[in-house]
Amino acid sequence: MKLAIIGLGMAARAHVAALESLHDRVELTGLYMRNKKRLDSAAEAMQTKAFQSVDAIAEDADTDAVLLLTPPDSRMEIVSRLAASGKHILMEKPLERTLPAATELVECAQKGGIHLGLVFQHRVRAGSRRLKRLLEEKQLGDIAMVRVDVPWWRPQDYYDQPGRGTYDQDGGGVLITQAIHVLDLMLYLLGPVRSVQAMLATTQLHDMEAEDFASAGVLFESGAVGSICATTASFPGSSESIRIDGTKGSAILEGGSLKVLWRDHTEENFEEKSHSGAGADPMAFPSDWHMQIIENFADVVEGKTQKLVAEGRDGLLVQRLIEAMERSNAEAGLRIDLDSF
């Protein structure tokens, strides 16, 4: 697969490292960003071509697909142009800033007949894959309760960056920028949410427009109940976790490590030694997961497999949940049915 990059946002470091590891599998055709000085410097450092516009990439016969790493406020026009030219797209989360805009973006890609992949890398972590198998095989029995915790930390200088934590650029705060990965994984493992009651807030630890704290009670379509707590105000930050309690046992996924507590009082552990960006450095994680996402995307583009790790419509599911939490908060904690979206 021949791939161009548009944008070099915060997640670029992991992607670039992943592409270096995949140099025999994925050929980089070039790079584009709006800042001309940064573009020339980055293209020289990466030893690749500096495209001068999105149109130039769209018209480039040697480029099969694009890795889109821009903030969500600049996505729609880019995706529309690339889809019209038949370029497949792998993009960082979220799809867009709002659910209607995200839906329009996915429909644009579908109309253009292109593959639209999303970088939800938590799905490919070892513990996540193991837990997915346990749930598919119903080894934990019927699921009764789910608890999601994202106790992360971001210093104020993180939010002092232009547009960071704003609705115009990011679409919100901790939910759509940080917790979206864990919420997507929750939905991937446990299925859709039926209803949600939430409270969002900005703590005194941050000066920012959007929320740095969110909590919610959720009811899954399966009948299981659950809770969500996500923040970037928990110093110094610790690993995100999903705890699942079933009739045959409980599973605790913390970071990428999985512990299973069976009802016969035996215990199994599956350890992953890695970080996930919980602390002050949001990019403190390896590139292995991104490498798997990009390799899967290449396989789909080349027709070697049909299923993306995560596709555009998966992004709509988690964005619908986030928007339901925001609406519940705006309506003083009223229970919101997701079918109303």
Image (tube, rainbow, N blue to C red):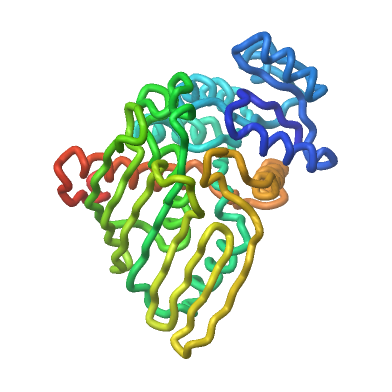
Q: Is residue 80 above or below residue 153?
A: above
Q: Position of residue 199 (x, y in %)?
A: 24, 46
Q: Residue at x 60, y 39 (%)?
A: 283
Q: Is residue 123 above or below residue 143?
A: above
Query: Nearest the camera: 223 or 81?
Result: 223
Q: Residue at x 48, y 29 (%)?
A: 158
Q: Quadrant of the N terminus?
A: top right
Q: Is residue 73 above or below residue 240?
A: above
Q: Is residue 116 above or below residue 151?
A: above
Q: Quadrant of the C terminus?
A: top left
- Residue furthest to the right: 24
- Residue furthest to the bottom: 264
Q: Residue at x 20, y 49 (%)?
A: 336
Query: Nearest the camera: 323 or 37?
Result: 37
Q: Position of residue 92 (x, y in %)?
A: 55, 36
Q: Residue at x 46, y 47 (%)?
A: 314
When asked about the image quadrant of residue 34, the answer is top right
Q: Position of residue 187 (x, y in %)?
A: 42, 56
Q: Position of residue 271 (x, y in %)?
A: 63, 66
When asked about the image quadrant of residue 141, the answer is bottom left
- Would residue 311 appear left or right of 175 to someone viewing this image? right
Query: Nearest the camera: 312 or 133?
Result: 133
Q: How many marks?
A: 0
- Would residue 24 appear left or right of 317 to someone viewing this image? right
